[in-house]
C-alpha cells in the first residue's frame, strides 16, 4: 500500500509549479525549432526566434517564461488503496502547494487570482484557490497533472452551440480572425467538442 505524506504531496505540487513556470516542455521546443526552420516570413521567423531565446534565458536563470504565471489547474487521479498521512483535505493540500510555489522567496510568481470574481475582486496574493479536478480510480497510486493557464488564453476563449448541420471548420475560420491581438504567441488553437 502506498503511503503519501502531507508535506511530500504539498512540496511536489509546489516544485512542479516552480518548474513549469520556468521551463517549456521538450516537445514544444522541438516543434518551435521545426517551425523556425520551415518559416518563410522574416517577421514570423524573428518572433519564433524571440520565443526560443526567451525560453533558453528563462531556463538558464530559473525565471518565469511569462509574467502571467497563470491560474493553477490540477487534474488528480487518486487510487482507492492510497493511504494518506495528513490532517488536510486533498484540495487544501493542493492549495497549500500553490501558495508555497507562488510565494517562494527565491522565485515569487505573479499572483493573479481574485477571491470573488463577481464581488470585490480582491487578489488572494498567493494564487489560490486552484481549479481542481479529482477522479477516484482503482489502485494504490496518485497521478497529478498540473498546469498554470494564463489569463490571456481565457480572455480569448469562445463558446458556441452549433446546430447539427453547421460546420465546425467554418465556425473556426470565421471566429479566429475576429479574436484580434492580445494573446501571447504562439497562438495554439484548442477545440473541445
Image (tube, helix red, strand yellow):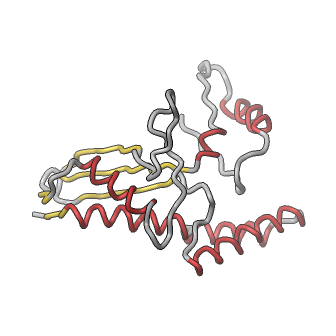
Residue extending farthest bottom: 60
Q: Nearer the viewer, residue 37 or 18?
A: 18
Q: Position of residue 46 (x, y in %)?
A: 83, 68
Q: Quadrant of the C terminus?
A: top right
Q: Position of residue 24 (x, y in %)?
A: 57, 68
Q: Residue 22 is drawn in which quadrant?
A: bottom right
Q: Residue 160 is drawn in which quadrant?
A: top right
Q: Please tell me which residue is depicted at 65% across the width and 77% down the height of the picture.
A: 57
Left/right of residue 143 with respect to residue 41 in the rendered view: left
The correct choice, above or below, for 178 with respect to 100 in the image is above
Q: Quadrant of the N terminus?
A: bottom left
Residue extending farthest right: 42
Left/right of residue 189 with respect to residue 127 in the rendered view: right
The correct choice, above or below, for 25 with respect to 92 in the image is below
Q: Please tell me which residue is depicted at 19% across the width and 51% down the height of the picture.
A: 88
Q: Nearer the viewer, residue 38 or 152?
A: 152
Q: Please tell me which residue is depicted at 54% across the width and 57% down the height of the picture.
A: 110
Q: Position of residue 70 (x, y in %)?
A: 53, 52
Q: Position of residue 129 (x, y in %)?
A: 39, 45
Residue extending farthest left: 1
The correct choice, above or below, for 10 with respect to 171 in the image is below
Q: Please tell me which residue is depicted at 32% across the width and 55% down the height of the picture.
A: 96
Amino acid at each position: 500500500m502506498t503511503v503519501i505524506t502531507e508535506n511530500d504531496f504539498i512540496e511536489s505540487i509546489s516544485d512542479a509549479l516552480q518548474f513549469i513556470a520556468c521551463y517549456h516542455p521538450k516537445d514544444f521546443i522541438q516543434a518551435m525549432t521545426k517551425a523556425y526552420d520551415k518559416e518563410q516570413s522574416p517577421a514570423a521567423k524573428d518572433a519564433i526566434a524571440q520565443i526560443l531565446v526567451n525560453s533558453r534565458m528563462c531556463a538558464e536563470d530559473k525565471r518565469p517564461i511569462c509574467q502571467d504565471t497563470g491560474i493553477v489547474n490540477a487534474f488528480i487521479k487518486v487510487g482507492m488503496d492510497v493511504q494518506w498521512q495528513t490532517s488536510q483535505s486533498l484540495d487544501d493540500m493542493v492549495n497549500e502547494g500553490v501558495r508555497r510555489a507562488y510565494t517562494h522567496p527565491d522565485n515569487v510568481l505573479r499572483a493573479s487570482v481574485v477571491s470573488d470574481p463577481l464581488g470585490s475582486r480582491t487578489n488572494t496574493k498567493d494564487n489560490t484557490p486552484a481549479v481542481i479536478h479529482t477522479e477516484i480510480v482503482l489502485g494504490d497510486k496518485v497521478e497529478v497533472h498540473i498546469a498554470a493557464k494564463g489569463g490571456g488564453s481565457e480572455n480569448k476563449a469562445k463558446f458556441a452551440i452549433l446546430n447539427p448541420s453547421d460546420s465546425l471548420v467554418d465556425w473556426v475560420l470565421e471566429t479566429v480572425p475576429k479574436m484580434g491581438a492580445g494573446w501571447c504567441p504562439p497562438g495554439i488553437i484548442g477545440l473541445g467538442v
